[in-house]
Image (cartoon, rainbow, N blue to C red):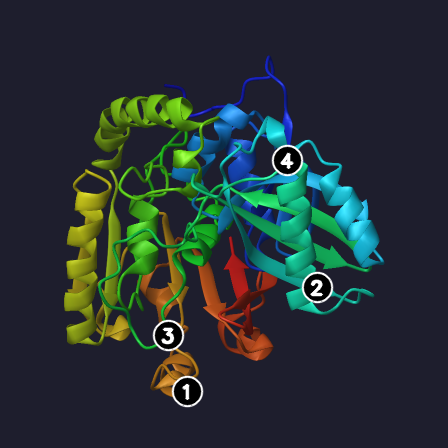
Amino acid sequence: MSINAHNKSSELFEIVAFCSSGLEGAVALELKKFGYKVFYSSSGRIFFKARLEDVPFLNMYMKTADRISILIKKFKAETFDELFDNVKDTNLKAIVQKNARIVIDKLKITNSKLSATGAVASVLKKAIVESLGGTDESGPIYSFILVLKDDEAHLLLDTSGEALSKRGYRLKTSKAPLRETIAAAIIMLSRWDMYGKGENFALFDPFCGSGTIPIEASTINLPNLNRKYISENWMILKEEWKKSRKEALKNLQNLSEKLSQKIIKGSDIDCQIIQVAQANMKVASKIFQTPLPVEFSCLDFKDLSVFTEKAWVISNLPYGQRLDDGKVIKDIKVLREKFPNANFYLLHPDKDFEKIFGKATKKIRFQNSGLWTYLFMYY
């Protein structure tokens, strides 16, 4: 199986990938890697075209997106009648089976005349059911999302189910864990390429906590075959899911061989959290059916050995509820001595961080668990 799933010979659908606001560029980069072309993006949503048959591939391989959904229809909705009529007139029968169990999973309404979420959800479900000609809801779940902004509606059908950030390997976390999709997005933005051309550069996380960044780095190109996805049960995709899973399993051996050549290291001053990271890595190895080349150690970042070769240092620096923030940041320039030839990708919410570590080549502001933070990039 080619890692590039894109096939222009079949009918293309508009697909929307959801992500954290500010990290749209990471999702676009990952889609480009797989051969897809983004044609539009807005806050937390990236629009691109793909075949319906690509849905299994996108769900198993995309690491920067929180969920993958199909854009069913885009329309103006200032009144309940407009909402109902537009949805009822949609050709849902082409995708949704007759006995579908309809769920209105998410409503996001901003600056629109229709604002009562309960009433919107009720009208929306009624219109979907009528579009199908009725349903006894004895079949699989079809979960719909409605994004209504400035009276413009996007009706979407979720293909993922549980958020794609739920990889399944985190038994425990540190005090301020980084969501898996955000960790993957930072790795993607750093251009540290797991299986790219040229050299294999080492990756270090000197404040690794429960190990999310190193684990995400080691699994960035591995399909998640372990978990279930909501669209696996749909009649229209059931066979495609079986086929895609078989192909992904075959592809895994080749990816695993390349993975064994990597150097990925995580360290933290908290020895208990390092034990958690090691436990999480063991679970991740089982989930991704591959031994992961991650080495965790209990070390203060000031005690790290000097690494003179080219490297990537990617880390979520201590702040807020993560203790000793001030002490760490005061000494953070020690990292430049420990990794004299490194590219640095460091997360911190204080825009004045550059006064301590130096002027960043680039910085990106995004939302991390409701808190606006910065990715400071030095390369």
Front-most of residues 316 and 337: 316
Which residue is under mark 2? Answer: 109
Whole-number angstrom distance, CA of label 2 to CA of label 1: 39 Å
User: Amino acid under label 2?
Assistant: Ile
User: Amino acid under label 1?
Assistant: Gly
- Describe residue 48's horizontal placement relative to residue 55 as left or right: right
Q: Earlier in the sequence, mark 3 or mark 2?
A: 2
Residue at 49% x, 27% y is 54
Which residue is under mark 4? Answer: 133
Q: Is residue 272 above or below residue 233?
A: below
Q: Earlier in the sequence, mark 3 or mark 1?
A: 3
In this view, the mark in front (2 or 1): 2
How far across and down, in percent of the image, does residue 107 sit? 62, 60
**Residue 48 figure quarter:** top right
Judged from the image, the secondary structure of the residue bearing numbered disc 4 is loop
User: Amino acid under label 3?
Assistant: Ala
Q: Looking at the rendering, in which quadrant would you find the N terminus?
A: top left
User: Amino acid under label 4?
Assistant: Gly
Front-most of residues 161 and 221: 161
Which residue is under mark 1? Answer: 326
Rendered image: mark on residue 176: 3
Whole-number angstrom distance, CA of label 3 to CA of label 1: 16 Å
Residue at 65% x, 59% y is 122
Whole-number angstrom distance, CA of label 2 to CA of label 4: 27 Å
